[in-house]
Image (cartoon, rainbow, N blue to C red):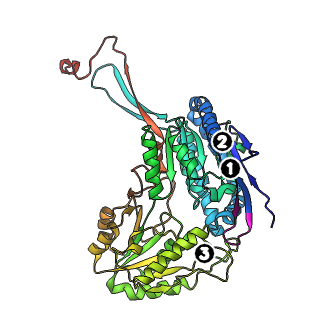
Amino acid sequence: MSVTRRIGHLIDGKWIFPDDGEMLRNVNPATLEPVADVHAARREDLDAAVAAANRAFRGWRDLPAPKRGEYLYRLADLLKARKGELARLLTMEMGKVLKEAEGEVQEAIDMACYMAGEGRRLTGQVVPSELPDKWAMCVREPVGVVGAISAFNFPIAVPSWKIMPALILGNTVVWKPSPNTSATAAAFARAFLDAGFPPGVLNVLAGGGPEIGQALAEHEGVHMISFTGSSETGKAVYRLAAGQLKKVSLELGGKNAVIVLEDADPDLAAEGILWAAFGTSGQRCTAASRAIIVRDVYEPLVERLLEGVKTIRIGNGLDPDVTLGPLINRAALERVAGYVESARRQGIPVLCGGHPVPELKGHFFAPTILGPVDWHSAPAQEEIFGPVLSLIVVDDPEEAIAANNAAAYGLSSAIFTRDLNRAMRAVRRLDTGIVYVNHGTTGSEVQLPFGGTKNTGNGTREAGQAALDAFSEWKTVYIDYSGRLQRAQIDTEHIVG
């Protein structure tokens, strides 16, 4: 198969294909066939992109927000028309099954429509002043140039959570997608161009490695960093940006758990766990990598899980019958295999899977269930980012919540129970940014905040109204029409009713 795509950088409304510099080759992780040749971004490309974003900022900021929303509506229409094409390319380059890829494009469509609507509702606050004939209010202002850094696992959905809220607020963007999904990023960015966004409003640096991410975080022309990736890298980005007191939004790792109580619907619980654990081959920050099960129902639930794993079909995500695709690359495969081998050496039972799939050409790892696992051990504490589920046995709901909260991450959690009182107590006490009841740990919706606690981030959120706070600054405005100098906190004592 010949390479048909050459991926360059989008800078100031034009595609740039440098004559020199490093070239990367992206391959389909299911077939190892080439997908695209990618120009690796250089420092001069970054500087040009940041300069373009700063030039475009004033005009884009001054455009009324409802007009900015019209661009996003046009973008949504284009994404709808190209949904099948984008999903197919995403599956070829990243590996997730086609239905999941289509769902990811739909999420970007939903986000475009949601944020376009915010163009007519970017609400601030109007409050009473303590002085007469004085108006007190606050409004949102854009931050400036946003540096967006995204990961490979959701190469369209996650960037949409960053780019679209940033743009509706009047910011401009320099986006560094994962080098592993450069072709998908370019196809997504092309829709912005075709929707008519002005030059420089969105700039894309393809094939950029860690050094470009570092330079973006440190660049004086960038006013905010929005990063999705590992907690270790996120902390490094945070330190780099802190030197210039930049605004930073971090969406990092997860070690998410599904709790199953003795009164749960066992079939529903098993189905929810399997989907949350093995969807996207476990390469989700919200993936369920732990199932915390009350002892009384442990054995029957394990039976259902093992039966369910047998129905998973592994292969090329373009095959409509396949339900589990490959890992992104060889390094990811070796990392997952290393975790499972370490568990074996610790004497942890491997109930199914636990190995690559040699009969398939790509980076496939069999769906794996470990257990029982001590909830303090490495498989129950460290993010594996692959199709590996650790089973933890507990005696009661109190221990289940303690086991969940023992992880250093706090993104998503779930509980299966028919008891409303237990469910509500768990919702209150589970230390995660997202809690599901009678559902797995995955499946966020764009109208609600997305993000977590502890090592999962720095307290910011993406999606929903919370995203507007992440990508804007508050400006407080006082208008005094009394015709005299009024002194707040001083003149108030002379005011009588």
Residue underneath mark 2: 45
Q: Amino acid at mark 3?
A: Leu
Q: Disc 3 designates what residue?
A: 324
Q: Tell me where residue 373 appears, x and y as whole percent.
A: 38, 80
**Residue 82 visible in the snapshot:** yes
Q: Are marks 2 and 3 in contact (CB under 8 Å)?
A: no
Q: Please tell me the numbered disc located at residue 77.
A: 1
- Image quarter of the C terminus: top left
Q: Residue at x 50, y 68 (%)?
A: 385
Mark 2, mark 1: which one is toward the viewer?
2
Q: Amino acid at mark 2?
A: Asp
Region of the chain picked out in magenta, as a range = 22-34
Residue 152 x, y percent position in the rendering: 59, 59
Q: Quadrant of residue 263?
A: bottom left
Foreground tag (2 vs 3): 2
Neighbour tally class for label 3: few under 14, some 14-19, many 20 plus, Cα within 10 Å: many
For marks 3 and 1, the one nearer the N-term is: 1
Q: Quadrant of the N terminus?
A: bottom right
Helix, strand or loop under label 2: helix
Q: What residue appears at the point 69 percent right and 77 percent down from the top-left corner? A: 361
Q: Is residue 212 above or below residue 92?
A: above
Q: Secondary structure at mark 1?
A: helix
x%, y% of residue 39? 70, 51
Foreground tag (3 vs 1): 3
Can residue 415 be seen here? The reply is no
In the picture, measured across the screen, residue 262 lies left or right of residue 496, that is: right
Q: Residue at x 40, y 31 (%)?
A: 138
Q: 10 Å neighbourhood of mark 1: few (<14), some, or many (≥20)?
A: some
